[in-house]
Amino acid sequence: MESPKEQKSQTGRDAICILLLAMVLMLAYMGALRFTGCRADLAESNMQANLIRINRYLNLKAPQNVLVGSSVAGRLLPEYFTDSNTDVVNLGLDGSRPLFAFEILSRHPEKPARLLLDTSTLFQPISANDVVMREAMKSPTVSLAEIIPILRPDSRPSSLLYDRLKTLKEVTTGGTSRAPFGSESVKAPVEIPSTYSSLRDALNGFRDEGIEVVFVEIPRGPGWAAPSKGWAPTLAEELNVKFLEPGPEIFRAEGDVLRFSDGFHLDGPSARKVAHYIGKSLVPDE
């Protein structure tokens, strides 16, 4: 029978062994991530998906094109723009607003060359989800993730697994079609949005910093091919900035081709097609 002193010594050795094993496993996991280049774009919760995009943006050295907006923009993954030779960082945050994404932009020491503005929630004020995200960004883990890559949200095993399963599902099952035109198309509200002035001032501020602003009407749900009649084109015209409408252009060129994973958000193949159109629209004609 071991004495108390021997038992204490054995417990200490066990603790050291466990710690060393954990370190070995962590280093092996980090090596695997570096070797394979694996990282998650999607996650098992809206919070984690948003943290992935925020953390990725904040760790870039020199962002060029940044897409900001809601989950509608979130479907246009950065890899979808590569066919058009355009690098785009995605800050399409689930349940969020561009006004909150502006706060993220201000945290980066370097400003993007171009701001792509998703119009789906353009005039909506800061939401409760945005407040939660703002608090989450203050956590020690988020700060440490800027130094230790393995702590970054896109390196979490659960997010990597979800990302692969979600991608596979969209490739194999696809989405459902929605009417390109019809009574469900977006109609212009009568009253000017309460955030109109503050949004205009914020965008003028970006332009004063040398950032090009481009509005993007990303197709979503029924009526996706109908030209926008909301306040977004009005503000774009007032600011004299480019207003892209991939839906009507793609429909005129190819017919009824876009599909939606849940009836509202683009599925993977359609999101890739829209991203390709946007990327090509940003490249100067040769």
Image (cartoon, grey):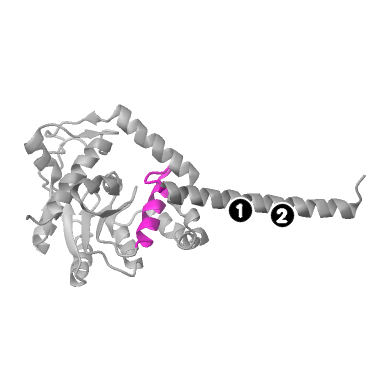
Q: Is residue 207 visible?
A: yes
User: Residue at image x 75%, y 50%?
Assistant: 14
Q: What residue span does the magenta drawing correspond to?
A: 37-60
Drawn side of residue 35 relative to residue 66, left or right: right
User: Residue at image x 21%, y 71%?
Assistant: 209
Label 2 amino acid? Ile
Q: Is residue 201 magenta?
A: no
**Secondary structure found at label 1:** helix
Q: Is residue 38 magenta?
A: yes
Q: Residue furthest bottom?
A: 208
Q: Residue furthest front?
A: 35
Label 1 amino acid? Met
Which dot marks residue 232? none
State if disc 1 and disc 2 touch (CB < 8 Å).
no
Quadrant position of residue 42: top left
Looking at the picture, tell me which residue is in the foreground, 163 or 246: 163
User: Residue at image x 16%, y 35%?
Assistant: 184
Q: Residues within 10 Å of mark 2 (few under 14, many from 20)?
A: few
Q: Residues within 10 Å of mark 1 (few under 14, many from 20)?
A: few
Q: Quadrant of the C terminus?
A: bottom left
Residue 195 on image: x %, y %: 23, 60
Q: Which residue is mark 2?
A: 16
**Secondary structure found at label 2:** helix
Q: Quadrant of the N terminus?
A: top right
Drawn side of residue 56 relative to residue 279, left or right: right
Tell me which label, 2 or 1, sits earlier in the chain.
2
Q: Which residue is mark 1?
A: 23
Residue 40 on image: x %, y %: 40, 46
